[in-house]
Image (cartoon, grey):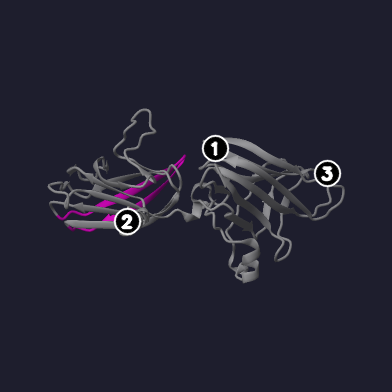
């Protein structure tokens, strides 16, 4: 082989590699085309998508395949990779009729619904961004104000669904974590378990040194939608370190008392005790910090929460002791499963 031939071959390989690298940067996305929709006034119809026009990458699955009763469900799109997604919908109707479009995002045993109001226009487009967890399932519904037809005479007019994965960074970085705190007193009744409510990092933590010490909520795990601020939801399967810190109020008890804190994991609606800490049988009134930590394997969708219990014979508060001594709950991703 001549020197010139070698150079030509090398140049060809470099060009092919460059093309391959460009192709590999295309974000994962799914495009679906629907069939003609005959809609009845006031009746909600879940769209059954007709065919996949394009499916790049392995982050999105259609049709949905994990339902034994309907193993190839054409109404449901399943997300495999957690991240930030761009959703776009297009509908072209024969007549200008107002209607409502709802996008249902189901995750384990929770559901979030996004609603779009369509004006009385023939061409309607809807776009939003969604943060989706692993195993999130998406379906699209239409409810018209009058009888109407959504066209499907050509690809340009057919109902069209596009889902593009913009970023998977948030949920795949080992070392990312979520730090949430409680800045208000929490009352607990004697002999009754209490699930602690949490907040995100408050404005008082704007100081950059404090932010650097405590970190940001880079794991995006704090879940107010499914648990009303009581818990964090595991975004991806992996090994995590969980740590909770609370401070009990001082109280001079009539008898010795115990104060407990538990880390509870809820997986598929089944609660499991991860770890617990007995805060002491106290004989005098003092502020009592209580700390629990554990390294544990968790599955995407698991809910982790902090439960407390005390038997002082009266109500007892979980208190805030100073500006930087707060009740906190941390979850850090150590490794992916």
If you read the primary sequence from the N terminus, does the residue marked by circle 3 or circle 2 appear first? 2
**What is the C-alpha distance between the residues marked 1 and 2?**
65 Å
Magenta stretch?
Answer: 96-121
Residue farthest to the bottom? 207
- Tell me, yes or no, whether the two marked residues, 1 and 3, touch with CB atoms within 8 Å: no
Q: Nearer the viewer, residue 97 or 253?
A: 97
Which mark's residue is nearer the viewer, 1 or 2?
Answer: 2
Mark nearer the viewer, 3 or 2 = 2
Q: Nearer the viewer, residue 167 or 227?
A: 167
Mark 3 Cα shell of 10 Å, populated few (<14), some (14-19), many (≥20): few
Residue 236, given in percent of the width and then of the height, sits at: 51, 45
Q: Which residue is mark 3?
A: 281
| Residue 100 sits inside the magenta stretch | yes
Question: How many numbered marks appear?
Answer: 3
| Marks 1 and 3, how far apart at CA | 32 Å
Residue shown at 29% from the left, 38% from the top: 74
Horizontal and vertical percent position of residue 53: 24, 46
Tell me the element at label 3: loop
Please state if 101 lies on the left or on the right of 229 as rendered.
left
Residue 103 or residue 239, whichever sits in front: 239
Gap in angstroms between the C-alphas marked 3 and 2: 87 Å
Which one is in front, 213 or 17? 17
Give x and y (percent) for residue 193. 67, 42
Q: Earlier in the sequence, mark 1 or mark 3?
A: 1
Q: Picture quarter containing residue 37?
A: top left
Which residue lies under the disc numbered 1? 267
**Which residue extends farthest front?**
2
Nearest-to-viewer mark from 1 and 3 = 1
| Residue for point 30% across, 39% down | 75
Label 1, residues with CA under 10 Å away: few <14, some 14-19, many ≥20:
some
* Residue placed under numbered mark 2 in the picture: 2
Element class at badge 2 = loop
């Amino acid at each position: 082989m001549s020197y010139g031939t070698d150079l030509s071959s090398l140049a060809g390989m470099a060009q092919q590699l460059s093309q391959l690298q460009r192709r590999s940067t295309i974000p994962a996305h799914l495009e679906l085309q629907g069939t003609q929709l005959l809609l009845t006034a006031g009746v909600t119809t879940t769209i059954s998508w007709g065919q996949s026009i394009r499916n790049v990458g392995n982050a999105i699955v259609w049709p949905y395949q994990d339902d034994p009763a309907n193993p190839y469900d054409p109404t449901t799109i399943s997300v495999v990779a957690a991240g930030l997604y761009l959703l776009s919908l297009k509908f072209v109707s024969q007549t200008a009729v107002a209607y409502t479009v709802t996008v249902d995002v189901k995750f384990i045993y929770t559901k979030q619904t996004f609603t779009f109001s369509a004006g009385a226009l023939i061409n309607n487009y809807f776009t939003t961004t969604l943060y989706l967890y692993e195993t999130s399932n998406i379906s699209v519904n239409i409810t018209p104000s009058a009888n109407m037809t959504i066209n499907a005479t050509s690809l340009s007019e057919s109902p069209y669904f596009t889902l593009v994965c913009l970023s998977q960074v948030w949920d795949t970085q080992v070392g990312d974590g979520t730090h949430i705190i409680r800045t208000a007193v929490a009352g607990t009744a004697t002999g009754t378990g209490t699930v602690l409510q949490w907040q995100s990092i408050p404005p008082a933590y704007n100081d950059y040194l404090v932010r650097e010490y405590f970190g940001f909520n880079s794991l995006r795990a704090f879940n107010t939608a499914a648990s009303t601020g009581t818990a964090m939801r595991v975004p991806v399967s992996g090994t995590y370190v969980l740590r909770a810190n609370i401070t009990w109020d001082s109280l001079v008890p009539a008898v010795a008392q115990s104060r407990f804190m538990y880390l509870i994991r809820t997986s598929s609606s089944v609660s499991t005790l991860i770890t617990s800490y007995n805060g002491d049988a106290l004989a005098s009134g003092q502020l009592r910090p209580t700390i629990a930590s554990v390294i544990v394997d968790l599955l995407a969708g698991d809910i982790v929460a902090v439960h407390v219990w005390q038997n002082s014979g009266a109500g007892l508060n979980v208190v805030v002791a100073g500006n930087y001594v707060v009740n906190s709950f941390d979850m850090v991703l150590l490794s992916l499963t």
